[in-house]
Image (tube, helix red, strand yellow):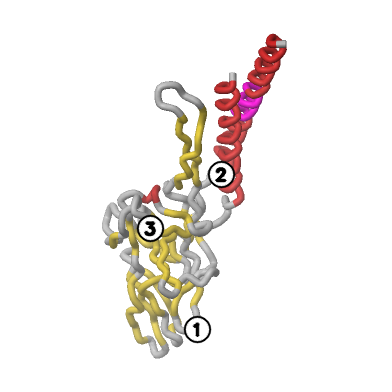
Amino acid sequence: MNRALYAAASGMAAQQQNLDVIAGNLANADVPGFKAATAVFSVIGRDVPLGTSSAGTHCIFSQGKLMKSGGPFDVALDGRGFFVVERGRERAYTRAGSFSRAADGALENNEGWRLAGVRIPNDATDVRVDGDGHVKVTRTGNRANAAGQIRIAAFDAPEALRTIGSSLFSATSASGPPRSLHVGTLHGTKVVFGMLERSNVSIVEAMMQILTAQRAYEANAKGVQAADEMLRIANNLHR
């Protein structure tokens, strides 16, 4: 009976964590480049299941829809891979391509992370980005210049990346080291200028997941009540 009580209680804790993860997905549904997470659980006990324990969360890196944006330096990835961003000596990876021009010409997001490999001259009058990530600018006097190339990284196990922000990730030993991804090929990843990738959170799907988790939580709560009642009856029998 104690085993039944523990199994049901651990199930309640698991579903509470599941609800927290789904709520976090919904809260970031409008954040460009955000990737939905899913809670992962494992069974306690080898031969006889004793309950449920948390095994962390994994991000789902399915493609989000691309939308036109009003930002003059916004970019999106159509396909796999991540933008490489830097802040001092730190390096991170993101699918969020909303950037603005800093005083020194670097492109940075609202958290100060800079897009690696690109500098926009002060006198640039027009900017364009090719599908392979090459950035070209037109400067005063109609001079055409290259302004760098956007670096794209890929991982062998992206689901093992560590989340360090709503849409930022860092490499781990499980994800493998980053490797440069050549983009712009016919059937490969392309860099799309003037657009942003929406989050891949489906509001309808998330609401259905909440209903399922709530029902599972309620079922486990009834299991706790039943186990508690059985313990009470057993105690009364000893008197």
Name above or below for residue 165 compared with residue 129: above
Instruction: Write down the quadrant of residue 20 in the picture.
Output: top right
Question: CA–CA distance between discs 3 and 2?
Answer: 21 Å
Camera-side residue: 109 or 68?
Answer: 109
Residue 153 percent across, percent down from the top left: 33, 60
Q: Main secondary structure of the magenta part?
A: helix
Magenta stretch containing residue 216, yes or no?
yes
Residue at disc 3, secondary structure: loop
Q: Indicate which disc, 3 or 2, sits on the residue closer to the N terminus.
A: 2
Which residue has dot 2 on it? 21
Which residue has dot 3 on it? 171
- Mark 3 Cα-neighbour bin, 10 Å: few <14, some 14–19, many ≥20: some
Amino acid type for the residue under numbered disc 1: Ala
Residue 169 percent across, percent down from the top left: 44, 58
Name above or below for residue 123 compared with residue 173: below
> Where does the C terminus fall, quadrant-wise?
top right
Instruction: Write down the quadrant of residue 78 in the picture.
Output: bottom left
